[in-house]
Amino acid sequence: MAALEIDPALRAFVADELLPGLDIDSELDSARFWSVLDSLHQRFAGRITELLARRDELQQRVDAWHTEHGADPAGYEEFLAEIGYLLPVEEPQIDVANVDAEIATIAGPQLVVPATVPRYALNAANARWGSLYDALYGTDALPQTRELAPGYDEQRGAEVIEEADRLLDELFPLASGSHADATAYTVNNGRLVVHTGSGEAGLADADQFAGSTEGGVLLVRNGLHVELRIDPEHRIGRQHHAGVADVVLESAVTAIVDLEDSVATVDGADKANAYRTWLGLMTGALTATFEKGGQTVERTVHGDREWTAPDGSPLTLPGRALLLARTVGHHMTSDAVLVNGQEVAEGVLDTLVVATAALHDLRGLGRFANSRTGSVYIVKPKQHGPDEVALTVELFAAVEEALGLPARTLKIGIMDEERRTSVNLGACIARAADRVIFVNTGFLDRTGDEIHTDFLAGPVVRKDAMKSTEWLTTYEDANVDVALAAGFAGHAQIGKGMWAKPAAMAAMLEQKGAQPLAGASTAWVPSPTAATLHALHYLRTDVAARQRELAGRGTDRRGMLTVPLLVDQLSDEEKRHELETNAQSILGYVVRWVGLGIGCSTVPDLEGVGLMEDRATLRISSQLIANWLHHGIVDEAGVRATFARMAELVDEQNAAEPGYRPMAKDLDGSESFQAALELVFTGRTEPNGYTERALTHWRKRAKAGA
């Protein structure tokens, strides 16, 4: 066994929290756990290094080609095939067993939540069910033209009830009349009866009635449930014409507990904190206590929900989202554990801890079940091509063997967010055909890799213009087409990316419905409220039927090789605005990551609109400025001056943040400001344009200084 140096906080977490109580071979004690990690690291770290070197080699050859040919597309595809970047098309068929229905057959929203904040993680787990009344009342999803009265505004409440009636008529129409005419909802001989002033009516589709309780009616459409909570004595129930106190939607069907882009974990204590959240969700013991409205609130994991089915039998539905864990990419290492002085392969450590914590669920030792089929779902990000997917699959098998798990217990979600994965997606799926339960597009990381891969071809288009480029539209279509051809329909998720404006729910309702129409069975949302509203899209769109319509469409992957270069000359004002937009975005995120250890933030943009930022958004902004700097669209002096101006603005925007350390007072001494500059000025040479190295370096310095 190699010499291991283990951070004391991480060692204590494993010995005192992770391992106790597991109903497995007593040999899995702390010493054996670390021995397993050592052997996994020894087996995989060297091969990971080789794969990272292969990335660098390919990038150098692409750089050389662009240096010679510039943006000329002639011969580019042939060149990429010649060097092994572009592989022959493969057409796999997946064969994955023991997949939970939330992934295999139920289409619905997916939350992504940082593992470092237990309160948020509990919110996400409990967001399986969400109040439509609350989502309409408190957001711009329902237009608000006046200031609301303090407490409960009855006029606003009436507007919410009216909109809920309209939605019920759309989604669960009556055989005659309108839900707005209802005076009562009752159940008679397994049939829903809606009483109106003119008589009685049933549902136009009687099969949409799914169950009832003493105080509620359960409806179902496209596999998602909606509950009418009836309580005429409730404040809102008294106002409602049929005593409906709330309309509750099945919302976040799945949720990803994130150990990667949305967290700032730079040492053993940080890692232990993140792992503790995942463990608490697997055992059901996670709690969070906080102050809200002048009162102390304790949040815990919700239990299952019980109804009586129309035939009189018991009906139990999960009270929680099915949870997946996202580990870090292959390029990450951590000094939380040193193996013979070498930082441990962080993805190896993540996988072992995630799987060990999940033993509490697999052995039935937790308060509630997560997977009901005996699977553990691990999302693996930032893989470059099928060889890296194959290594992940082998790592999963090795962890299963070490923990005594049945083969293929660990399932893989493949993030389709790097170009070499996108253009070889069929081959990537083929390497994990008996484990893959998810592919998901990620616009921002994919854009960051797009810029970095073709960095020397020329200056790229502005960030917002990326959304209409040929490579992006091809990428979004191909992700669906390749997955459908591989047999994902009814067996695995096809996912799409995040809505980045948490406060803009009206715009989300208008735009995000395109994702299920595009054949995606899930898409990411930034909050439980957004999950409830996004669920309306899946209630409207029968994703399974839409996937059948799209099957066989096919998308030519060559469109993804079209480099998104500037064509028209930009005015000085356009250059200034783009530079300021990206510099402000970088600083707004970095100052919280480095200074406060916050890995995911709602960062106000130049106009004060809150945008959800994580390392993926940081990657694209830093790569764009670095690209423009390299090609002379902007110069170093202008970049530095812009960052200095934006530091003052960001300081103003964060002035009320507890513990915030302003940048503008001492730019040279601000770790956050220096980190932001480093991300831009080393963006050209940073492998794959990733941001983690610089962030981690400066965060550690900030923690040491604090």
Image: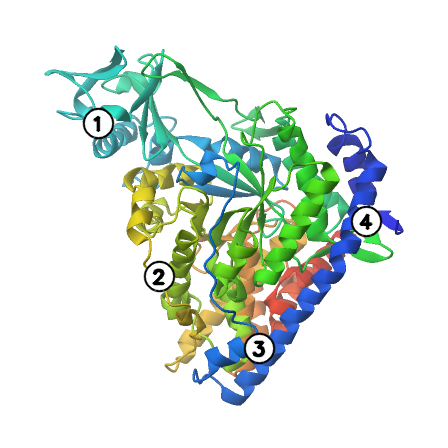
SS for tag 3? Answer: loop
Residue 602, horizontal then vertical, whole percent: 51, 49
Q: Earlier in the sequence, mark 1 or mark 2?
A: 1
Q: Is residue 518 visible?
A: yes
Q: Which residue is mark 3?
A: 83
Residue occupying the point 51% across, 28% down: 293
Q: Which residue is mark 4?
A: 38
Depth order, front residue of 462/437: 437
* Three-letter code, disc 3: Ile
Q: Residues within 10 Å of mark 1 (few under 14, many from 20)?
A: few
Between the C-alphas of marks 1 and 4, the distance is 59 Å
Hey, which quadrant is residue 29 in on the image?
top right
Between the C-alphas of marks 4 and 3, the distance is 35 Å
* Three-letter code, disc 4: Asp
Q: Give the left or right position of residue 344, taking residue 328 as reference.
A: right
Hey, which quadrant is residue 341 in on the image?
bottom right
Q: Residues within 10 Å of mark 3 (few under 14, many from 20)?
A: few
SS for tag 4? Answer: helix
Q: Which residue is mark 1?
A: 205
**Is mark 2 in CB contact (under 8 Å) with mark 3?**
no
Residue occupying the point 77% across, 55% down: 43
Picture layout, residue 562 above or below residue 534: below
Q: Which residue is mark 2?
A: 554
Depth order, front residue of 530/609: 530
* Three-letter code, disc 1: Asp
Q: Give the left or right position of residue 628, taking residue 35 as reference.
A: left
> Of circles 1 and 3, which is in front?
3
Residue 146, horizontal then vertical, whole percent: 29, 39
